[in-house]
Amino acid sequence: MKLKHTMGILITYDLVEKHEVIKTAMIQMGYSKVLKWQTTLIYLPNTALYHESSTPQQAIADLKTACAKVGLYEGPGLERAFAVTFDNINDYTWEAIPGKPFGS
């Protein structure tokens, strides 16, 4: 997957179970565990994902859809979620610990 310098959507969420199943479903919908800024790859935390061209509303809807398919619903299984638009990463003040590549 080719990543651009600008971001579309960043979503983070808390689940009571089935983390890997939900993450895999979200990745199949076009979300990524990694984003790129200049020459730096930022490996996102376990329950954070990036989508290059979505909206916060669509990101939450996608998460709810992925959760519903495995019987997790808002409240008892999907505890909380937050999605935000970033039009251009250079317009924001941010800090990161980029982390190591997954699996290393």
Image: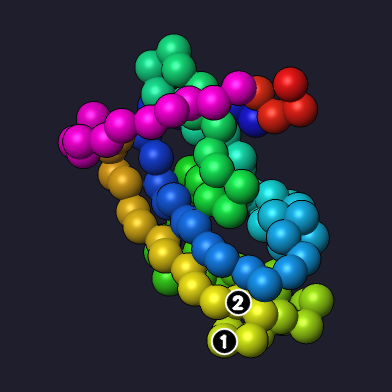
Horizontal relation, residue 66 to residue 70: left or right:
left
Picture coordinates of residue 51 (x, y %)? 52, 48
* Quarter in which the N terminus is drawn: top right
Q: Could you say where residue 21 lies in the image, as x and y percent from the top left?
A: 79, 60
Q: Residue furthest front?
A: 16
Q: Find the distance from the CA under tag 1 to the CA under tag 2.
A: 6 Å
Q: Which residues are magenta?
A: 90-100
From the viewer's side, name the closer residue of 78 and 91.
78
Q: Secondary structure at mark 2?
A: strand
Say if 64 sits above or below 88 in the image: below
Image quarter of the C terminus = top right
Viewer-nearest residue: 29 or 32: 32
What residue does disc 2 label? Answer: 78
- Please report contact status of discs 1 and 2: CB closer than 8 Å, yes or no: yes
Give the prevailing secondary structure in the magenta stretch: loop
* Image quadrant where residue 56 sits: bottom left
Q: Which residue is located at x 63 percent, y 69 percent?
A: 15
Whole-percent x, y for residue 102 in the image: 70, 29
Q: Which mark is residue 39?
A: none
| Mark 2 nearby-residue class (10 Å; few <14, some 14–19, many ≥20) | some
Mark 1 residue element: loop
Q: Nearer the viewer, residue 46 or 52?
A: 46
Which amino acid, mark 2?
A: Leu
28 magenta-colored: no
With respect to residue 60, does 29 lie above or below? above
Q: Amino acid at mark 1?
A: Gly
Residue 58 visible in the picture: no
Q: Residue at x 61, y 42 (%)?
A: 32
Residue at 56 percent across and 66 percent down: it is 14
Q: Which mark is residue 75?
A: 1
